[in-house]
Amino acid sequence: MNLILFTFIVLLGFTSYYFGRRKAYTIQSTNKRLTALPQFYGYYLAIWCAIPAFIIFSLWAIFEPTIVKLLILSDYSNQGYLDDELNLIYEKTKALSRGQFTGEITPFIEASAEKYLSLRSIAQSSKVVIVLSAIIASVAYAYKRISSNSRTREPVEKFLNAVLFTASLAAILTTVGIVFSLIFQTIDFFKVIPLFDFVFGTHWYPAKAFVRDSSEALDPTMYSDTFGAVPIFAGTFFIAFIAMCVAIPIGLMSGIYLAEYASTKVRQYAKPLIEILAGIPTVVYGFFAALTVGPFLKELGTSMGLEVSAESALAAGGVMGIMIIPFISSLSDDVITSVPQSLRDGSYAMGATKSETIKRVIFPAALPGIVGSILLGVSRAIGETMIVVMASGLAANLTLNPLESTSTITAQIVVILIGDQAFGDPKTQAAFALGMSLFLVTLCLNIVALRVVKKYREKYE
Amino acid sequence: MKKNGVKMIKIKAKDVDVFYGKKQALFNISLDIEENQVTALIGPSGCGKSTFLRCLNRMNDVIDICSVKGEILINDFNINDKGCDVVRLREKIGMVFQKPNPFPKTLYENVSYGPTIHGIAQSKQEMDEIVETSLKKAALWEEVKDRLHEPGTGLSGGQQQRLCIARAISVKPEVILMDEPCSALDPIATAQIEELIDELKKEHTIIIVTHSMAQAARVSQNTGFFHLGQLIEHGSTDKIFKNPDNTKTQDYITGRFG
């Protein structure tokens, strides 16, 4: 039903567009100067058709269920039911009306279900009537306005402005919403676990929190020495560090090669090939790290008399570095290519060689962009999940030995949230606390990146 | 400059052809350039005068599809020979570009760039001297001596171009190529640069590409007129401007085309 109505409104919109445009042509044929191009008349009419329909649709979607629920539950008021029980009754009613109810059917609920159905159909038909009459009224109003040849371009432009604004607002609000949900859960977490223990504790063992019986009251003492985040922070930065040790030199050098040395032909093939690396799903990197690189490193280590864990920070970090190479290489290639040719000419004309020119002129000029691309790579390394889950192990060891297994923030969030979880449980909330700290770390990183870029830009422009 | 009444020839171009891919840009250019004189290359846009200028320090090497044929003798040495060291060549032949292109570095680093990469200065003190004399010769010293460690890009257009000239002369080149050095500058800055060119020709041989006939007449002793990739006529500036042999030259100089 809704779909039919919606299609109908869309068709109406198109029709009114053509009507509006035709009206504009008729006005034009009477030798009057139009206030805007004919299609603006069409857009104007179509917008006046769409806006009221959209507003009524959204209002309906928001209020209809609430009102129906109120009306149904008014039959049960003053009978001493609790809120939870009322909700249950309402859910039963809905299920019965859809024919999906399997429990015992009481006459009360049957009556409610009938009432529910009739209410729904009333609501549905009144919606159709209201929407259509609103459309007719507003289109008639708009048609009158364009008939008198009043301005249409400004309202249409304003409407587009509003649409674009809404789109960006939606993006911002979503971010704010996510951050707030993180904040509240994090605050709850720190009510049970002291902030100090989380930030400075060196023992991360969330599995200990599994054994709690949810009916028992929370006992903070049992969580002491469970949520000390130092090992996983250390692991995160350690693996990111290994990754950047791989990614920065290789990425930067390949970027420089592509931008300055490679012939057009090589560049034409090499650049897309490197960018394919960026398109490989991280899961694939993950099992490459876990099944190929990890065992290989273990064997290599054993043959040299070293003890290497099959899941090592080195394997995860190394593969993560390979994953980040294309970002750094491609971005720095772009940045280097965009350094003006006149600077290169100036340097070559002084008798500088290619490498001198790159080292002394191009690299400094491209540095802000290169630093930006590196920090972007670091953000990715810290936020990367799949590779570490699969290849670096899940035990949060506090170690700086790249051959042992370590764990990261993201991997621990996965561990915590896989399987059964209960809201309001410190174990679940720990994931939010970790997410929050991860967010803060990347935020700081981005701020630093912006600062650095800005500072260098001031210097070099 | 004449020695014993004989003109000293610094650069001798013989039958130079230049191709961009398959398109020929210069045809059989043969031109002698006198030492310690200013030679102006004039002609309408796209006539090949800049291309010819860029042949003289092999800047066309930078362009992949560009190939140069023929002989260019500088001090009787063919720079198009395989054995020619481009780095040494460009040390001897400096260049100033159309748009001022100071490096995104400090003024000091801009001027010390050449001496550094060619290992000319042995000490910091020596480098300071080179920077100071170069800036003085480029008539920029008084304006910038208190801010040598500020970025060169912060100067005005005319100052930037003089900085580029200081950068070019810092390695004491024998020849300075100038590719429309004043086209991005206002008349006052242009006058300063022209005055500078006159000063510089005492120690350097200068070849300048220009679109301004008046400028060619003011600064140069010799002039070459290019048209559609051919060198139509060359000789002393006096003769080219007052009594050219070729009617095309006459037409161009009097502004009938171009």
Image: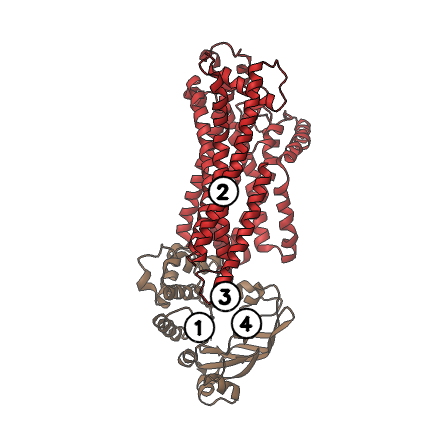
Chain colours: A red, B brown
Q: Using a 10 Å C-alpha cutoff, classify the residue at mark 1 as few (fewer than 14 neighbours), some (14 to 19) or many (20 or more).
A: many
Mark 3 and mark 2: span between their CA atoms?
A: 32 Å
Is any part of residue B229 visible from this angle?
yes
Circle 3 chain: A
Please state which of the two labelled residues, at mark 4 or mark 2, is closer to the viewer.
Answer: 2
Quickly name the residue at label 3.
A29
Measured from the top left, where is residue B36 in percent x and y?
44, 77
Amino acid on which disc 4 is placed? Thr
Secondary structure category for the residue under label 4: helix
Quickly name the residue at label 1.
B204
Secondary structure category for the residue under label 2: helix
Measured from the top left, where is residue B257 in percent x and y?
49, 82
Quickly name the residue at label 2.
A133
Circle 4 chain: B
Say whether residue A265 is left or right of residue A366. Answer: right
Secondary structure category for the residue under label 3: helix
Q: Nearer the viewer, residue A441 or A2?
A: A2
Secondary structure category for the residue under label 1: loop
Q: Earlier in the sequence, mark 4 or mark 1?
A: 4
Mark 4 and mark 3: span between their CA atoms?
A: 59 Å
Please tell me if label 4 and label 1 are on a single chain: yes
